[in-house]
Image: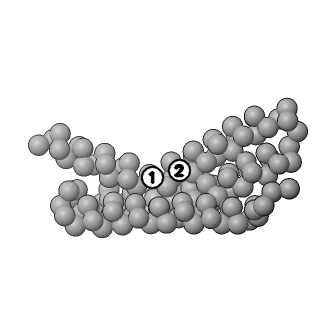
């Protein structure tokens, strides 16, 4: 047995992903348009709307995949641990992609603004 709760692991990783997503949202959609680094407009509103389900879903997926990997490492047969671990890592990677989506889109907008000038 382990010395930690799988539910606590899920909750901790979910909260870390959620807080990271909130920080990225504030930076991408408040600070950068506020200082004029990117132009606010319809595309920014669309990205903001799209980033909400992707960020929250990504945080859930990140927490769930870390719990999945921990549970499978403890309970699965040794022959299937590698495959299940890769599956959990893939889920965590997809979750991180959802969390950093707003930053990637805003960084693309910023770079496009630089190269157009």
Check the image and report above or below for 5 versus 94. Answer: below
Is 2 on the left-hand or right-hand side of 39? Answer: right
Q: Residues within 10 Å of mark 1 (few under 14, many from 20)?
A: some
Query: In front here: 14 or 37?
Result: 14
Taking the view exactly as shown, the residue that stands out farthest to the left is 117
Quadrant showing the C terminus: top left
The x, y position of residue 105, in whole percent, is 36, 50
Q: Residue at x 63, y 41 (%)?
A: 90
**Which numbered disc covers residue 69?**
none
Work out how far the residue at label 1 is from the one at label 2, CA to CA, in angstroms. Answer: 6 Å
The residue tagged 1 is: 100
Q: Secondary structure at mark 1?
A: helix
The x, y position of residue 75, in whole percent, is 86, 48
Q: How many marks?
A: 2
Q: Residues within 10 Å of mark 2 (few under 14, many from 20)?
A: many
Q: Residue at x 22, y 67 (%)?
A: 34
Quadrant showing the N terminus: bottom right
Q: Are marks 1 and 2 in contact (CB under 8 Å)?
A: yes
The residue tagged 2 is: 96
| Residue 116 appears in the picture as rendered | yes
Is 74 on the left-hand or right-hand side of 9? Answer: right
Q: Secondary structure at mark 2?
A: helix
Check the image and report above or below for 109 versus 11. Answer: above
Q: Quadrant of residue 73?
A: top right
Is 116 on the left-hand or right-hand side of 53? Answer: left
């Amino acid at each position: 047995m382990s010395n930690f709760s799988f539910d606590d692991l899920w909750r901790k990783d979910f909260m870390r992903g959620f807080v990271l997503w909130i920080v990225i949202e504030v930076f991408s959609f408040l600070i950068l348009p506020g200082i004029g680094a990117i132009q606010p407009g319809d595309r920014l509103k669309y990205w903001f709307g799209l980033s909400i389900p992707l960020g929250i879903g990504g945080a859930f997926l990140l927490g769930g995949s870390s719990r999945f990997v921990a549970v499978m490492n403890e309970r699965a047969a040794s022959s299937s641990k590698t495959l299940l671990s890769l599956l959990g890592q893939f889920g965590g990677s997809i979750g991180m992609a959802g969390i950093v989506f707003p930053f990637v889109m805003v960084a693309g907008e910023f770079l496009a603004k630089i190269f157009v000038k």
